[in-house]
Image (cartoon, rainbow, N blue to C red):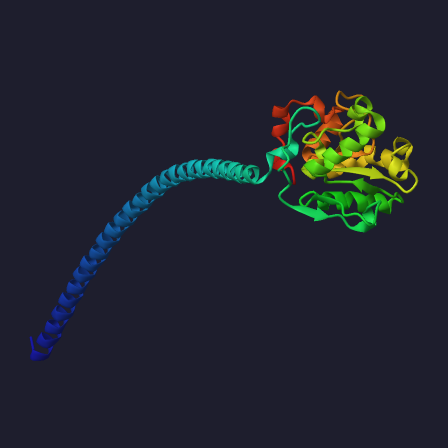
Amino acid sequence: MNKKNIIKILIMVVVLSGLGFLGYYQYSFDQKIQNQLNAASSTFSQKISDIETILLAAQEKNTTLADALAAAKEKADSLDSQFKSVNKNVSNLEKITKTDPELLQKYSKIFFLNENYVPLDLTNIPTEYTFNKDKIYKIHSEIWPHLEDMLKDAKQEGLSLQIISAFRSFTEQAQLKGVYTVTYGAGSANQFSADQGYSEHQLGTTVDFTNPTVADTFSGFSKSPEYAWLKENAYKYGFILSYPEINSSYQFEPWHWRFVGISLAKDLHKSGKNFYDLTQREIDDYIVNLFD
């Protein structure tokens, strides 16, 4: 065998060896890749399983959290409701302490106001609403807005409500009762005029109405359109007729109207009852809303 053939054989052996090595290497490489893929697949599957477990746990946790949040909200709402209730009670208590309890007392031969009692705040009634333009008429300052609204609304409907009497002091009531007693006699005067200390006028919550036709005699006011309007509408402004046709205090006084607050006035109108039909305890419940 010549040298040239030997070289060819050696080259073929090297090539075949190389190919064998490459084949083995390829096989080994493929096997390694496969093993890595299998390991990665297994790891991936485990990760998926772990994630599912975490999601389930999170879902359960979220449900528990949702329940907790719902319970917390319910408790918060309850506390808020309680707070509002307490706050309202505190506000009501404050209103009660600032409101003169005398303003809803039953006078007219029942309760007594001493000679020193005067409402804390009185305001003058404009002369456009009064009968005697030269006289000063006063009303409780908190009541004036309600009275003014009523007078304005009556005027818009073509009526002429005029105030002929409003706040009267203890002394003024004594003087007036003295005049009535002299003029009509004690028996007759007691039927339509309160003694000093028993008059609703001393509270500053009460007015007597007239109109230009009736003037200062009061005669015929019960037949006037003004009286008819008051019967239908005065309660909307917080005023009630103290002495209707049937009452145990005085004779029928269609001109005499007392402010008791819109809430009480509406309830009296709805029930058809008179102020003096209620017990003082029932009336006292309305003191908190007197000026609302």
Please name the residue shown 67% across and 46% down the image.
122
Task: Judge by depth and name the residue closer to the eye, 182 or 149.
Answer: 182
Q: Is residue 14 left or right of residue 44?
A: left
Quadrant of the image for the C terminus? top right
Q: Is residue 43 left or right of residue 279?
A: left
Q: Is residue 124 left or right of residue 161?
A: left
- Residue 104: image location, x then y, percent: 65, 32
Kindly tell me whether residue 239 is visible in this rendering. no
Please name the residue shown 87% across and 38% down the image.
216
Task: Judge by depth and name the residue closer to the eye, 181 or 68.
Answer: 181
Please name the residue shown 32% across and 43% down the image.
54
Count of labels in the image: 0
- Residue 96: image location, x then y, percent: 56, 37
- Residue 5: image location, x then y, percent: 11, 76
- Where is residue 28, by image quadrant? bottom left
Please name the residue shown 75% across and 20% down the image.
248
Quadrant of the image for the N terminus? bottom left
- Where is residue 177, by image quadrant? top right
Name the outermost residue toward the front. Answer: 182
Kindly tell me whether residue 199 is visible in this rendering. yes
